[in-house]
Amino acid sequence: MARFLCTADLHIGRYSSVGTDTSGDDYSALATWERIAEMAIAEQADAVLVAGDFYDSASAQYESRKRVKGSLEKLRARGIVTLAVAGNHDHHALLDFASLHRDLIYVFPPGQWDEYRVKGVRILGRSFPKEYHRDSMLCDFHSADAAMPTVGLVHADVQGQGDYGPTPLADFANSGVSAWVVGHVHAPQRYLDGQVVYPGSPQALDWGETGDHGVCWLEIGNGQPRFGDLVPISSACYQYTDVRLAQHESLDEALLAKGRELRTSKSVLSIQFRVDLRLDAHDERQFPSSAPLENDWYEVCSKSRACEVNLEAEAQQPDAKGQAARLLLGLEGKGKIEWQDRASQLVLQLQNRMSNERGKLRLPQSESVRVLCQAGPDDAAEAVRRMLERILMIEGNAQ
């Protein structure tokens, strides 16, 4: 059995933004790397695989060199190999570091494939050749020999069309490699039934990186690879949330309760909330636009009134409010089947529209775009719900 701890996109040199200030070392990408090294030692990994963007910049490599070297020395002392490819951010920085410390880390060369063997497993890798690379990272890959278990390590934009190694899924599917560890996209993702895995960035750094962030294990037994579930390790968590408050309820207490639910990992020190707040129809309380909350922080992004309407009664009416009530009941799985079908169609149409509009965004760092392009059905359903509730709350015009 071979066990590899897989990570990517650490961006050492950066910090998670906590509250209004850039935070200290507890929220640094460098400290996260040190936690990863400690995990590899504690759980007896055979190797640590890093799929690019270990450093955020060349200057970060100089500033963090002593601590990175120390963590790699600890791994080496336990017989744990560290293997990496350079990404678009560190295509020079990581290779420069490795040239000085060849005994601590092996970085696969840019522009060509090479291999490294660990416990009877062949790891194939290729580094990013320069800051921008418009060809598939697997364009010159020759199908691997199936006689030996093989793992691929690469930094690439899977199914992308931009400047950062856009690589079609078909290239991975036809490679003969049964497990690929891929970097560049910061959100954990899996393709081809788990054959191609983005571990994602282990430390959530900003609002483009919501949800859980961590590392994953790759185990190979009897020649068969298996990726484990994401192991959360980030000390910061960014979370969009809806909060419905009754007049006697406290927003702080509601968010503290949500924070306790989200702290499934002991590593999470701070949760950053962006809140869509819903109040009872006659609740006139004012809330600050942003405020600290123990170790957490929240921003109120929107505030609306809850809809106090008898939906069953309104649904009997033939007007626009009646139609809105029927669709709302359909969203809740109530009423006639045709109401539920029409509500589902409306949600799907809005979801497609949201994905299309978000997909048009162009941000400085393309790895953030993919997260913004994801419009889930829950987002669309909530948007439809609010639209219909606004219709029901409109006062009738005088005749």
Image: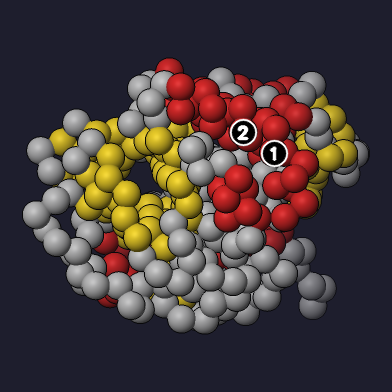
Q: Residue 335, relative to residue 61: is it above or below? A: below
Quadrant hosting residue 124: bottom left
Q: Nearer the viewer, residue 179 or 384?
A: 179
Q: Residue 69 carries which label?
A: 2
Give the residue type at disc 2. Answer: Lys
Residue drawn at x 45%, y 39% is: 82
Q: Residue 24, relative to residue 116: is it above or below? A: above
Residue 211 shows in this picture: no
Q: Where is residue 279 in the image (x, y as percent from the top left)?
A: 75, 41
Decide if residue 6 is on the left or right side of residue 302: left
Residue 257 shows in this picture: yes
Q: In which quarter of the image is the C terminus?
A: bottom right
Residue designated by label 1 = 65
| Secondary structure beneath label 2 | helix
Residue drawn at x 52%, y 23% is: 74
Q: Residue 364 carries which label?
A: none
| Secondary structure beneath label 1 | helix
Q: Position of residue 130 (x, y in %)?
A: 59, 71
Give the residue type at disc 1. Answer: Arg
Q: Quadrant of the N terminus?
A: top left
Q: Are marks 1 and 2 in contact (CB under 8 Å)?
A: yes
